[in-house]
Amino acid sequence: MKLSVYIPCYNAASYLERSLSGLLNQTHPPDEILVIDDGSTDNTVEIASKFPARVIRHAQNKGLAAARNTAFRAAKNEMVASLDADCVAAPDWLARMVTHLDDPDVVGVGGRLVEGVQVSVADRWRRAHMPQEWGDSYVRNPKFLFGCNNLFRRSTVLNAGGYDESMRTNGEDCDLSRRLMLAGHDLVYEPSAVATHLRQDDIHSILDTYWRWWKSGVNAYSTGMRLRTVIGHAIFVHFRYTFLEIVSRDLRARRFELLPLDLLVLMYLPYRDFRLWLASNSAAASQRSAAGA
């Protein structure tokens, strides 16, 4: 079975060579490798050009969902796999996933992401509280397939309208999975299809990423921004559910070094919500002013 694989990239020069090398080492070799450069300002394109890959460039940064849609429109094969630029696929990654597509009801397969970098407290917090996998066992129709490593039928994704390009950095994978399953299609999680995450985080980057995950994952402000919503989330969501849950998990696992970061999360999430509310109010005021003029 012929496969296309794409890597969406935005300033991914520090990871891309290892990611592409892993794709060239597959036991089920891809017939086509696409690198979607989403307006990078580093030497991502220069690195990609050294490999047998087709590079497609966006003139400016459009976001992750747009890069994924570009790949699906450009791919020449029906089976299209995705691997994030900061991931390295195990040699049997594609072979483990593609067998599930012998089932005509299955339109997508996701693999397991293991955390390969555990240098900082932020890295260890990411492994504990931001896993991109569903455990050790096969799952038919998990909540969603993570965008970092998966395989889809191209025609099904395009017929579903592709990825929602308003989701520039997060949530596009949850949204597509939801729409596909609502349409009656099946998805599969295959834990033996393994990719290793090379990402390195510091305190600021992990807090920012976690807030964006939360916001996109729960569609937090889809109905508009209100100050009482921000306050309500701070009390009834961020404290009661998020903070108490992550603290209890860390205490049970005796991950005491993560507790200070748990406390920072409790302070950071309402802070970012409040900033978003201010920006929303400012934008609304500008629109009213322009309409009055």
Image: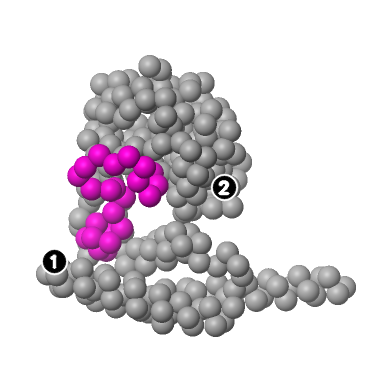
User: Dot 1: within a 10 Å radius of its alpha carbon, few (fewer than 14), some, or many (20 or more) residues?
Assistant: few
* Numbered disc 1: secondary structure: loop
Indicate left or right for 114 with 217 as reference: left
Which kind of residue does numbered mark 1 sit on?
A: Ala
Residue 287 visible in the shown view: yes
Q: Name the residue that disc number 1 marks.
A: 253
Residue plotted at (22% across, 35% down): 192
**Image x and y of residue 183, in percent:** 52, 40
Q: Is residue 136 above or below residue 120?
A: above
Quarter of the picture containing the N terminus is top left
Rendered residue at 23%/48% (across/down): 135
Residue type at numbered disc 2: Asp
Given residues 152 and 122, the one toward you in this image is 152
Q: Compare marks 2 and 1 and give the one earlier in the sequence.
A: 2
Location of the C terminus (image quadrant): bottom right
Establish if 34 lies above or below 261.
above
- Tell me: 53 left or right of 250: right
Establish if 273 lies above or below 137. Answer: below
* In magenta stretch: residue 140: yes
Which stretch appears magenta? 122-145
In the rendered image, residue 165, in percent from the top left (x then y), is placed at 58, 48
In the displayed orientation, state which residue is furthest to the top.
1
Direction left: furthest residue: 254
Quick check: 233 above or below 172? below
Residue lying furthest right in this view? 293
Q: On residue 164, which mark appears?
A: 2
Is residue 272 shown in magenta?
no
